[in-house]
Image (cartoon, helix red, strand yellow):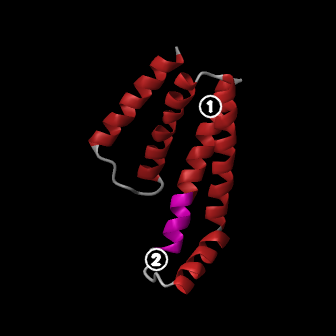
Amino acid sequence: MKWMLVALCVSSTVVGDVFRSLGMRHHGEIHDFRPGAIGGALSAIARNWMVIVSTCAMAVSFFSFMKLVSIAPMSFAVPVSAITFIPETFLARYLLKESVDWRRWTGIGLILVGVIFISQ
């Protein structure tokens, strides 16, 4: 049961983060900070389907993590949830076309080793 919750938490977090990034890229940078303009930007962001998907996915992530913490030790749940950085980095590199240097790949490797130690 706990590994199913880990999978649900990780996958929904990854979906949420990627869709949030895509949604905010679609909206673009906010340049006008007058109250009316900020309200218009928030309204446009709230209607963006990618941001809506992101918000729903992050809600699933939150509740699955709360359930995970209720059945597994915190010393397991928090470190193992760091595995989200692995698929997020791959998706950032290949889907979002971001630059990922060797230091980040090294960090991803260390996270993977840490998760393997925690899971034993």
Q: Is residue 43 left or right of residue 91?
A: right
- Residue lying furthest top: 120
Q: Amino acid at mark 1?
A: Val
Q: Indicate yes or no whether the magenta region holds residue 16.
A: no
Kindly indicate the quadrant of the structure image that contains residue 31.
bottom left
- Residue 33 spot, x, y in % from top left: 46, 81
- Magenta stretch? 20-28
**Viewer-side residue, 55 vs 34:** 34
**Viewer-side residue, 92 vs 42:** 42
Determine whether 101 is above or below 20 in the image: above
- Residue 58 spot, x, y in % from top left: 63, 49
Determine whether 87 is above or below 34 in the image: above
Label 2, residues with CA under 10 Å away: few <14, some 14-19, many ≥20: few
**Viewer-side residue, 61 vs 4:** 61
Q: Secondary structure at mark 2?
A: loop
- What's the magenta bit mostly, secondary-structure-wise? helix
Identify the disc placed on residue 67: none
Q: Indicate yes or no whether the magenta region holds residue 23.
A: yes
Residue drawn at (53%, 62%) of the image: 22
| Residue wearing tag 2 | 30
| Residue wearing tag 1 | 6
Residue drawn at (34%, 38%) of the image: 105
Determine whether 108 is above or below 15 in the image: above
Residue drawn at (48%, 74%) of the image: 28
Q: Amino acid at mark 2?
A: Ile
